[in-house]
DNA sequence: CATAAATGATCTACGCTGTATAGATCTACA
DNA sequence: TGTAGATCTATACAGCGTAGATCATTTATG
């Protein structure tokens, strides 16, 4: 029973990786597992249940860092692992944003962040907010990168500027030289996590002993 | 022609607001406008084009702040306006994350953030990254709040903890008292924007004259 | 051991979906 | 009046999620 469910979720994830999230249909998943569509229902409930299960399946790829190491290293590891998951399953990360993190898998990850923040000396009252801020940014970055929000589509920066009348975009104009450069997304992500760590440190000094 | 397109996008947004994003079907939109489904195609291309148009329609609700005011006030205004849009159209914000911001409407908003960051004294090389960080967090927060990631579903914090064996969640256990409290989401959002502003200030001092 | 209950899988069918294709109906201008 | 272009309609098709009924096989119970 549980094996079958895992088999089904693996099939769904494989389909999403290969042909996008919209290619996940009960028929397609069933075909891949070698069953009829209706045979999936006892295992996953319905399609929504299948997608919920997929969220768990994805989150289970996140290694929970050893709580003996430095809090900063743990947050780094979590952040980069999350981004890795997003890169590995770009079509499926969107699900993480639309379904509440209440499955055991999600709670496990959240708890790891709680512990890291507590170990960093953040006041308990601030921990839940900073956890949400941290995971929102990390998840949002991974998703933006994976699902196209950061990409330019067909238009390069120059083309984008051309859509509007001359002088309508002073910001873009002033930054033209930098906007045309290719972006080092690894470095940008690391810098974001760095900034976030500084926010956490500031918050812990403020409330520190 | 352009009027019809606006009419179509308004209808689509109204349907999303009333019955969720999945209720946007070519037939439902056409019905609401008083046309047959196929009549939409010359105006929006196809369904994907309709959703792209919807992104523009949503972004156009964001007021671009007067560039004469303080940069901090401008970012605040943008952030809160974006969250307002997310609250007004909770079912539709998800689209903002999955489609690249290359429409004139999106570029206009991005430019406003660029200007605010430049006026804050951020070094031009850092402006694009901080814009992405800012909008990722603001958008991610609005979307998480609107689409249920921050909500607990049916399980209250106590119930969530119960899913795993005793002692498996030391973080949750240590924070129990705070996790049971209701959250003031307005205050949390303001605190996040505050932290972000501090990141920006730090970045501008570092590169300042 | 016999029987009942539960589980897993199947088949059929219904009302939905996006959209290709073809044809109808206007308006404007020569 | 004739024609070109824009706009909308009608029909049709393949694929979707899943309700409902049925059946086989395994598991639990008297």
Image: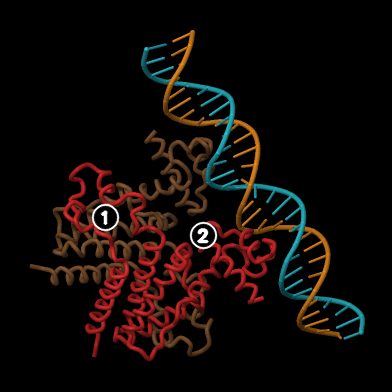
Chain colours: A red, B brown, C cyan, D orange
Q: Residue B44, percent across and down?
A: 43, 41
Residue located 22% across and 42% down the image? A165
Q: Is residue A141 left or right of residue A47?
A: left
What is the secondary structure assignment of the residue under circle 1?
helix
Crowding at label 1, few (<14), some or many (≥20) Cα neighbours within 10 Å?
many
Residue located 13% across and 53% down the image? B68
Tags 2 and 1 both on a single chain? no
Q: Is residue A103 left or right of residue A128?
A: right
Chain ID at mark 1: B
Which dot marks residue A181? none
Residue that numbered label 2 is attached to: A21
Q: Residue A82, percent across and down?
A: 41, 73
Image marks 2 and 1: residues in contact by CB distance under 8 Å: no
Which dot marks residue B110? 1
Residue located 41% across and 55% down the image? B95
Q: Observer-nearest residue: A142 or B17? A: A142
């Amino acid at each position: 029973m549980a094996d079958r469910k895992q088999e089904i979720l693996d099939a769904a994830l494989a389909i999403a990786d290969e042909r996008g999230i919209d290619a996940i249909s009960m028929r397609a998943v069933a075909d891949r597992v070698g069953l009829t569509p209706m045979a999936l229902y006892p295992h996953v409930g319905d399609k929504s249940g299948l997608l919920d299960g997929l969220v768990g399946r994805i989150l289970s790829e996140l290694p929970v860092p050893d709580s003996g190491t430095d809090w900063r290293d743990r947050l780094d590891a979590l952040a980069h692992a999350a981004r890795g998951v997003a890169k590995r399953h770009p079509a499926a990360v969107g699900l993480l944003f639309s379904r509440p993190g209440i499955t055991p898998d999600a709670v496990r990850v959240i708890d790891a962040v709680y512990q890291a923040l507590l170990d960093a000396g953040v006041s308990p009252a601030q921990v839940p907010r900073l956890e949400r801020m941290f995971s929102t940014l990390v998840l949002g970055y991974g998703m933006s990168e994976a699902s196209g929000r950061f990409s330019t589509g067909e238009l390069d920066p120059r083309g984008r500027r051309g859509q509007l009348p001359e002088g309508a975009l002073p910001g873009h104009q002033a930054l033209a030289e930098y906007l045309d450069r290719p972006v080092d997304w690894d470095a940008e992500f690391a810098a974001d996590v760095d900034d976030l760590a500084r926010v956490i440190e500031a918050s812990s000094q403020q409330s520190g002993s």
